[in-house]
Image (tube, grey):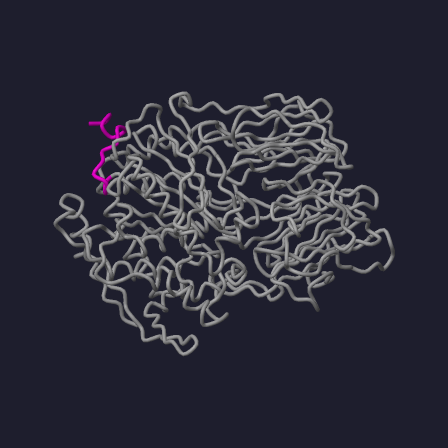
Amino acid sequence: MRHSIMLMAALCCIMMACTTKEEVKFVYPQTAKVDTVDTYFGVKVPDPYRWLENDTSKETASWVKAQNDVTFAYLNSITYRDAVKERLQELNDYEKLGTPFRHGEYYYFYKNSGLQNQYVLYRKKGSSGEAEIFLDPNTFSKDGTTTMRGLSFSKDGSLLAFQIAKGGADRAEAVVIRTTDKSLVEDTVRNMKQSGISWRGNDGYYINRFAEGLSASHGAKNDYQILYYHKLGTPSSEDKIVFGENIKRRFVSGYLSEDERFLFVSAAEGTTGNELYVQDLSKLNSKIIPIKADFESDQNVIETDGSKIFIETNFNAPNSKVVWVDASTPSFENWKDLIPETENSLSTSTGGGKIFARYLVDVKTQVKQFDLNGKLEREVELPGIGTVAGFGGWKNDEDIYYTFTSFTYPPTSFKFNVATGNSIQYEQPKIKFNPEDYETKQVFYTSKDGTKIPMFIVAKKGIELNGKNPTWLYAYGGFNISLTPSFSASRIVWLENGGIFAQPNLRGGGEYGEEWHMAGTKMKKQNVFDDFIAAGEYLISEKYTSSEYLAINGGSNGGLLIGATMAQRPDLAKVAVPQVGVMDMLRYNKFTIGAAWASDYGTAEDSPEMFEYLKKYSPVHALNPGTNYPATLVTTADHDDRVVPAHSFKFAATLQEDQAGTNPVLIRIDVNSAHGSSNISKAIDLIADYYSFAWYNMGVTPTVAKKDM
């Protein structure tokens, strides 16, 4: 394969474009085409950039370098880019503390002193002991891109298994240490991806991993997982299969009750719906028996009490509820309601022998405390309107911890006394901005089919609604994921420079339960795009902004959202920033864990109708030659083994070919990063590029740049 890459001409054009962009049409590195054609139900679909799916080939590497050279030449020519980066570093340089959690005699917590690439795991003896560094992932690699995740302590806290991933990829290896002296017990790669570990005593643990191993190629398909029991000190080849040998499922996980009497097994084919099984380990040679053996609903065991099993489920309850059942007859026909479904979406956690029900009330968290008989004990008083995480712990904990945050309230830890319901502020970060300068509004706008959609709008107090405010419109809309109020120090840079941040809660998410989720899936996916387009139209009609000052952004499934919106409404926004997007909807299920997304998307092989529906909105296929598309910065990373880089590669190549206007179409491919930035410095670099690219193409000079003039 021969590539004709007009790099020098492209670089010259880039430099000209950054001074007279309205008059100069970009010349991009040429991308070779191949004659690959797929046939779906008799319809032939060309795939001229199929070769870019091989992300480890020399040809693809050359293409990536050429594209990055052009992209960074453009970004480097924006004079205030360094000033934006410096302000981002300044605002992000504050001490960040995670919510404490107890194991054995110690309380563990994550801490970042400011601009450390990775959060450091600390611990202290008791709740008021002297803090010490326990594990520092910043020492795992020279460039700070190796990440640590998936901590799993044995019940007595003496052993810890954790996962290490290079470049922040999903693929990882497991390491086991003694917590007393951090000495190594085991250091073994175990085909870990979307994997977890659950200890049984101190002798071994349950681990789920892909049966056939993992290929080195980022695009290799991951077929199904098996749950094993691994005895400490033995080779993985001797691991005992617990579940998944005869019943093959794409995802399998196992977890134990706190008393280690019961093993629960969850098995799923996609991201929606799971089977649930139980094994009573107190009985010799007991079998794994089904609690609910279908994929009609989601269910998860949250607690046990003797032989009682407590389950959170959305079976016959789209907003979820809590039920209980006796382990002797655990089938779902015997479930009894404990905390009934309400009009608000529910998620739960347990600690101190209580159940904490977190409700989303118009996308704002409300927390209620119940006992194990389902009696409401109190509504927890929160610091304000926002988002809560935590309220988890052991049964005998008297105090548990939670974190509260909102758009202008940095994540703050609180210690909560289970008996009294009193909260005490535990740690509050100190950041260099005044939250009183900003305000958050929630509005409800009307989508294309008349559905009311909530949206948060954050801006400086008293901002003038003149249609000229640079506005960042961010959304997701999929996989039952809820976008709730959250804090970002980096976002303050956008806001303090006169920008507006808007976050709509599109269908496909989980903000209003399973019905809201399902209303944005498969052949209702267009609802998601309609909701997003309507959000942009609302912001324009209400004079928050105009098309010339609107930037649209989303990542992963949200990247698909941006690609589809660009194809359907290229006039909506001036700037588009699709991150690690799912851009080829006809082939997404061919790579890594993509097949699991079929529960939300459907596949091109399902039926002629599903194929036509996907093809119509698939960003790679829906673009039209000769169209004036927004200024676009596509982003992806070389280690992304979740949404493989080929999606973004093919989309960028197609968009560069089809772009008729003078707006730039660039792709930024990060090195040693994955589905998200692999460290803080890379994240800051990325956001600096986003904001600089957006402001420049809007013709806006941010105040942070004017200070240096």
Q: Residue 455 appears in which quarter of the rendering?
A: top left
* Up/down of 555 relative to 397, above or below: below
**Image x and y of residue 471, in percent:** 32, 37
Magenta span of residues:
696-709
Q: Is residue 485 magenta?
A: no
Left or right side of 462 for 504? right
Can you name the residue that lies furthest to the right here?
284
**Which of the 4 image quarters holds residue 48?**
bottom left
In the foreground, 663 or 84:
663
The quadrant holding residue 191 is: bottom right
Q: Residue at the location (36% across, 41% down)?
A: 473
For the point 45% across and 72% down, the residue is 608
**Residue 675: image location, x then y, percent:** 46, 50
Left of 212 or right of it: where is 665? left
Left or right relative to 404: residue 108 = right
Q: Could you tell me residue 320's position as x and y percent?
A: 64, 45
In the image, residue 640 above or below residue 459:
below
**Lateral position of residue 4 relative to residue 314, left or right:** left
Q: Is residue 708 magenta?
A: yes
Q: Residue at x 58, y 26 (%)?
A: 382
